[in-house]
Amino acid sequence: MTTDMIDELLGDARERMTKSVEAIRSEFGSVRTGRASPALLDRINVDYYGTSTPLKQLATISAPEARLLTIQPYDKTSIKAIERAILESDVGLTPNNDGNLIRLGVPELTEERRKQLVRVVRHIAEEGRVAIRNIRRDVMHDLRELKEAGEAGSDDEHRAEVELQKVTDGRIAELDELLKHKEAEILEV
């Protein structure tokens, strides 16, 4: 029975760590590289009638050209709020509004902006590493509680901790690989 509980804890840890890596992967998608992508605006929330609402729920976002994003709000009255949210975000794009449609020209990245974006993705990756370490810490705590309650032996606990560390190292290596690719993509001229 104890090995079932330990396996369950390890399985849960694997699943949560994988979800953390996937969350960071999607965060990386919202960081701008040289080309326009609707994912750039995924992190933007708009103050819509007093409620913070994700931009993608308020408008259709498309990339008709390599250097242009268009935002078509479902509600024309929200266009000013959308414009303000984009200006206040860290995306670094200036909205151009014609009353019906917001256009965002995506300029070439300067060397300074590239370095800023590399710092942003490194910060995002570090948040991911911290999340993975927190999951490991929680599961280690649960394993110790099992041992102290007499439901698992020292050997079982030690084996589980070694296995948990392998999973943790693997997920952090996966994050580092994602970071390396994203940095290369940003620095590519």
Image (cartoon, rainbow, N blue to C red):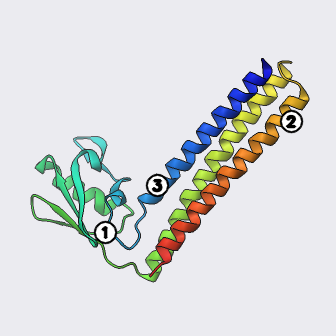
Q: Secondary structure at mark 2?
A: helix
Q: Is residue 189 left or right of residue 148?
A: left
Nearest to viewer (mark 3 / mark 1): 3
Q: Which of the marked residues, 2 or 1, is nearer the chain's N terminus?
A: 1
Mark 3 to mark 2: distance in Å? Answer: 35 Å
Nearest to viewer (mark 3 / mark 2): 2
Residue at the (52%, 63%) spot, across then down: 121
Residue at the (53%, 73%) spot, across then down: 184
Residue 133: x %, y % from top left: 68, 46
Residue 119 visible to the viewer: no
Q: Where on the picture, by quarter, is residue 92?
A: bottom left
Q: Which amino acid does the dot numbered 1 rest on? A: Leu
Q: Tag 3: Cα neighbours inside 10 Å, few (<14), some, or many (≥20)?
A: some
* Above or below for 15 versus 42: above
Label 3 close to label 1 by CB (< 8 Å): no
Mark 3 to mark 1: distance in Å? Answer: 18 Å
Q: Seen from this angle, which residue lies furthest right?
A: 154
Disc 1: which residue: 93
Q: Quadrant of the C terminus?
A: bottom left
Residue 27: mark in rendering = 3
Label 2 close to label 1 by CB (< 8 Å): no
Disc 2: which residue: 158
Nearest to viewer (mark 2 / mark 1): 2
Q: Which of the marked residues, 3 or 1, is nearer the chain's N terminus?
A: 3
Q: Which amino acid does the dot numbered 3 rest on? A: Glu
Residue 26: x %, y % from top left: 45, 53
* Above or below for 2 versus 93: above
Q: Secondary structure at mark 1?
A: loop
Residue 173: x %, y % from top left: 67, 57
Q: Tag 1: Cα neighbours inside 10 Å, few (<14), some, or many (≥20)?
A: some
